[in-house]
Image: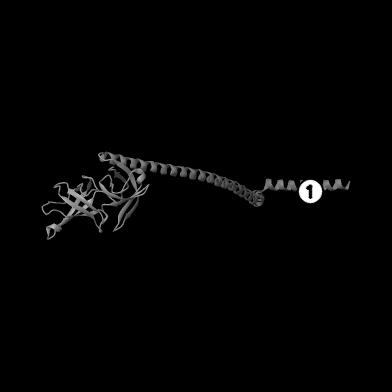
Amino acid sequence: MYKNKKVGVVGVIITIIILIFIVIFSNGESNNSFFENIASNLVMPIQNGLTYLKNKISGNNTFFTDINNLKEENAKLKQANSELEQSLRELENIKTQNETLKEYLGLTEKYGEYKTIPGYVINKDISNYSKIIVISIGKRDGVEEQMTVIADKGLVGHVVSVTDTTAKVQTIIDTASSVSCSMSTTKDSIVCKGTLDDKSLLKAMYIPTEANIIQGDSIETSGLGGIYPKGIHIGTVQKVTNTRNTTDRYALVETAVDFEKLDTVLVINTK
């Protein structure tokens, strides 16, 4: 009985409070604002916090998702880049091989009168005193000592030593080299030797006193001396130097072959 009375009293009190609030809300704009402000001050921070937390969680999820996507894309791009680099290397190799084959074909056509062995330069020793190159062919390919070596533009030198797979070539710009030559215009015989000063100049000596040698004259092998066949282009006269004694005059001959860029050669097989 006592409990029922107590519950009834509490119910009445709650009802009265609710009625008071209804009256206040319905009668006063200012009071309405007051309670709205209270509700706003209590509720809004909670609402803002929940919203922030939601956005934060949502943003983090997106961030981690983006990171995973970027990792996958980066891995795919690296793989694609590696494949492209490999393709480029293969294309470069094919291009180099094609260029080498074209050079060989051009050399073979140009020097079709000779039986030749194709090769390429694998080492260079182009110093002031020694101007030697090593080529990729040797005894197994039929190369022997004293054989003439040529390139697209003209004479390179001759073989001085051979292994089974390589050959050492003394170039015409070596200071120890001496080539018997002739001038294309007058057919006078001269001798061209390598110089210390330049990697592309020869010194033409023993010029006959009656020979009219001028700048621009073409110089080629004379066929004398027992090493080089006749008619292989050597270079052109760059400068003629006259001396008091006409027998001592000389000329500088610029080689047709660029030894700094020399790559492909042919060895003339005289056997």
The kind of residue on which mark 1 rests is Ile
Above or below: residue 168 compared with residue 97: below
Across and down, in percent, residue 118 comes to 32, 43
Depth check: give the residue in front, 262 or 58: 262
**Which corner quadrant of the image does residue 103 belong to?**
top left
- Colour theme: one colour
Quadrant of image for the C terminus = top left
Q: What residue did someone put label 1 on?
A: 13
Number of marks? 1
Tag 1, which secondary structure?
Answer: helix
Depth check: give the residue in front, 224 or 19: 224
Can residue 9 be seen here? The reply is yes
Whether residue 231 sits left or right of residue 43 in the image: it is left
Depth check: give the residue in front, 84 or 154: 154
Can residue 137 be seen here? The reply is no
Q: Report the residue at 82% width, 48% height from top.
A: 9
Across and down, in percent, residue 31 comes to 66, 50
Across and down, in percent, residue 114 comes to 26, 40
- Decide: few, some or many residues near mark 1? Use Cα within 10 Å; few <14, some 14-19, many ≥20: few
